[in-house]
């Protein structure tokens, strides 16, 4: 009998950015979707909160969700996001580069909803801030059926994150077909894009956001003017908010 050799091999992957995926509770999805509908369907509000000139997307409508609305009408999302950021900052290699124990505040710099219809797309782009995210509130019912008709490289409606070069033994992209309730958190500098779909009269709706992490003991004279000048567009929150639920495992869904 041949003795089995045990090599004790271990995979080591120390490079590259981290993407964290989670699932939003249905009540939060509904609140954000309902508010987005209010903004998108009212011509006056759609014009007032139009955010398209600040974004890269080639899409029908993009409207801003204000921090005041989040704080007053959807604090549960703020708490969820705070816990998700804590989870993100507590895993490697993120925790090796930002020292989570030194973060004091989280600023939601901007949040907006993207209303995407047949032929709309988002080219390769990056965001502002330190961390960015995207969540999904509507996906066309026919998306899966449409994808089955693609004879090669199915990609309609997918989001794609890209990092590094395509090489043997190394992947340089992550592609995902979104479902309602999906939420992703990633470094703001991580390049990503969204493919179009073809089915008419159906909407793919997502909301994106940028956040900035403020270290403890940061020079107040340097930061205070920028925070005051942008007070209408930004809200800051304690990083270790005692009201945040301890639900870290929910943010590491497959």
Image (cartoon, rainbow, N blue to C red):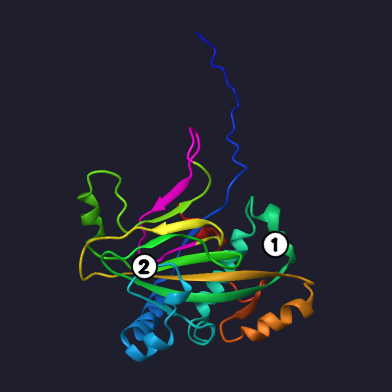
Toward the viewer: 127 or 245?
127
For label 2, the crowd category at 10 Å Cα-Cα, with few meaning under 14, some 14 to 19 and many 20 or more, is some
Toward the viewer: 219 or 37?
219
In the image, is residue 90 above or below residue 67? above
Ranked by sequence position, the earlier of labels 2 and 1 is: 2
Looking at the rendered structure, the secondary structure element under dot 2 is loop
Q: Quick check: can you spot residue 112?
A: yes
> Which residue is located at x 60 percent, y 68 percent?
129
The residue furthest front is: 53
Q: Position of residue 239 (x, y in %)?
A: 66, 72
Q: Which residues are magenta?
A: 166-184
Does 204 sit left or right of 8 as displayed? Answer: left
Circle 1 residue: 100
From the viewer's perspective, is the residue at label 2 or at label 1 nearer?
Answer: 2
Circle 2 residue: 58
Asked if the residue at tag 1 contacts the one at tag 2, i.e. Cβ–Cβ closer than 8 Å, the answer is: no
Does 24 sit left or right of 224 as displayed? Answer: left
Q: Position of residue 77 (x, y in %)?
A: 50, 75
> Which residue is located at x 73 percent, y 82 percent?
224
Q: Is residue 46 magenta?
A: no
Count all numbered tags in the image, as a single digit: 2
């Amino acid at each position: 009998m041949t003795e089995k050799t045990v090599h004790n091999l271990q995979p080591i992957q120390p490079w590259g950015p981290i993407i964290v995926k989670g699932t939003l509770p249905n009540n939060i999805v509904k609140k954000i979707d309902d508010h987005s509908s209010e903004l998108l369907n009212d011509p006056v509000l759609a014009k007032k909160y139009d955010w398209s000139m600040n974004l890269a997307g080639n899409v029908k409508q993009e409207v801003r969700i204000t921090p005041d609305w989040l704080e007053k009408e959807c604090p549960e999302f703020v708490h969820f996001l705070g816990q998700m950021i804590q989870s993100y900052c507590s895993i490697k290699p993120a925790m090796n580069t930002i020292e989570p124990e030194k973060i004091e505040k989280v600023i939601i710099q901007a949040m907006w909803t993207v209303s995407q219809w047949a032929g709309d797309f988002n080219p390769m782009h990056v965001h502002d801030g330190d961390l960015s995210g995207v969540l999904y509130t509507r996906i066309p019912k026919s998306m899966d059926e449409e994808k089955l008709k693609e004879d090669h490289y199915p990609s309609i409606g997918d989001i794609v994150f890209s990092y590094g070069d395509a090489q043997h033994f190394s992947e340089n992209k992550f592609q995902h077909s979104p479902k309602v309730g999906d939420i992703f958190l990633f470094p703001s500098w991580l390049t990503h894009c969204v493919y179009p779909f073809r089915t008419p009269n159906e909407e793919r709706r997502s909301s994106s956001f940028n956040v900035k992490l403020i270290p403890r003991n940061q020079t107040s004279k340097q930061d205070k003017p920028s925070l005051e000048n942008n007070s209408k567009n930004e809200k800051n929150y304690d990083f270790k908010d005692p009201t945040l639920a301890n639900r870290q495992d929910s943010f590491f869904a497959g």
